[in-house]
Image (tube, grey):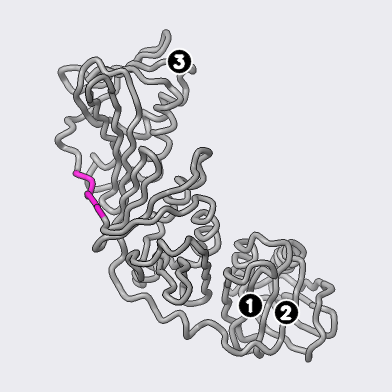
Amino acid sequence: MKLSIPKSELQRSLSRIQAIVEKRSSMPILSNVLLEATQDGDTGSLHLAATDLEVGLRSNQTAEVAEVGGLTVAAKKFYEVVRELPEETVTLTTTDNQYLELKCARSRFVLAGTAAEEYPTLPGTTPDKTVQVQAVVLASMIERTMYATSSDETRYNLNGVLFEVASESSKIRMVATDGHRLAMAERTVGSEAEGLTSGVIIPRKGLAELKRLVDEDDADEVEIGFEGNSGLVRKGDVTLVMRLIEGEFPNYQQVLPKEIGLRFSVPNEDLVRAVRRVSLLSAERTRAIKLELADGKLSISSSSPELGEAQEELDVDYSGEDLAIGFNAKYLMDALASMGSKEIEIGLKDELSPARVQPTDDRDTTAVVMPMRL
């Protein structure tokens, strides 16, 4: 293999895979990136691929290819080297003993490598139905749901986000829950969503990689589709594949509050800051805070025998009956931080029922937080 490629293009491609490659694995080769140079007529390409056997990413960059071939090298060290190079053309050459020689301006590096044939094959997925979704839409949905996924490996079916198509509205919907809170976001992508495989669970790591992809500067639309237990996302010359979580997602509709008798609106940032300050003196184990509603006032307090107590008051748009309810401060702050809205509405039934949190200007985003007994 011998090729030349602009440093900026190579660095960008390598940066995409850093979170995918396995740092500690029983298969050391999973910490490597696969490099393959190909030539199709007058067009040369450098293909990069990385996988941890659950999530994989492939990308193609135009390059001046003098000799086709491939090998694998340590992804992290290769990236660190390329990142420090000057903004000039990089020449990559493989040697007979599977080493990669890298030259740029007056710099020269030689990295140990392994044969390309030893690298695991990334799964090939060709869904029957795919849809084009605006990158900004997917980014918004991920921000509003991923925080509520469970990190408890024993509850494997909650370690991701449910992706489904709402049959009644042709909206795409994402739902996440860890048993203590729930997050849901819906967005319209048009009638083309009909027929898309629905009811799949996207793993947290795959979702994080998707978020990085849609956050790139040139991201406009991405193609998304599912087949069997695999998911595919394509953005230009970059393809993300992932193994979906196999399991039954809980019936989240049962958790969504049906009876909301008490509502109040409050500036989101003011509430986040108040909860953050008050939670400083909450018990370390429970992070419990108390919200007390009275006419036009919201009092937020916490107390701990070891730390002391804190209280803060906010003016709110509320004229209902008095109510006191407890929450885990972290769960409440996570929900508020995900809203991306200046003002939020919190709906309550009583002190023992879950709270519904929604932006006042976006009823397609919902968070549910379970209360705590005080």
* Residue in the picture at 39% in, 33% down: 14
Q: Which residue is more in the foreground, 288 or 203?
A: 203
In the displayed orientation, state which residue is furthest to the top: 106
* Residue labelled with disc 2: 291
Q: Are marks 1 and 2 in contact (CB under 8 Å)?
A: yes
Amino acid of disc 3: Glu
SS label for mark 3:
loop
Image position, residue 75 (x, y; %): 34, 34
- Rounded to the nearest angstrom, the CA distance separating label 1 from label 2 is 8 Å
Instruction: Tell me the quadrant of the picture where the N terminus can be found.
Output: top left
Q: In the visual, does 371 lie left or right of 177?
A: right
- Rounded to the nearest angstrom, the CA distance separating label 3 from label 2 is 58 Å
Mark 3 or 2: the one toward you: 3
- Rounded to the nearest angstrom, the CA distance separating label 1 from label 3 is 55 Å
Please report the bounds of the magenta region as a residue range: 121-126
Q: Neighbour class for label 1 at 10 Å: few (<14), some, many (≥20)? A: many
Residue 278 in view here: yes
Instruction: Tell me the quadrant of the picture where the C terminus can be found.
Output: bottom right
**Prevailing secondary structure class for the magenta stretch in the rendered image:** loop
Image position, residue 98 (x, y; %): 19, 23
* Residue labelled with disc 3: 88
Amino acid of disc 2: Leu
Q: Is residue 106 above or below residue 333?
A: above
Q: Is residue 246 above or below residue 346?
A: above
User: Is residue 285 magenta-colored?
Assistant: no
Amino acid of disc 1: Phe
Q: In the visual, does 284 lie left or right of 37?
A: right
Q: Neighbour class for label 3 at 10 Å: few (<14), some, many (≥20)? A: few
For the image, the number of numbered tags is 3
* Residue labelled with disc 1: 327
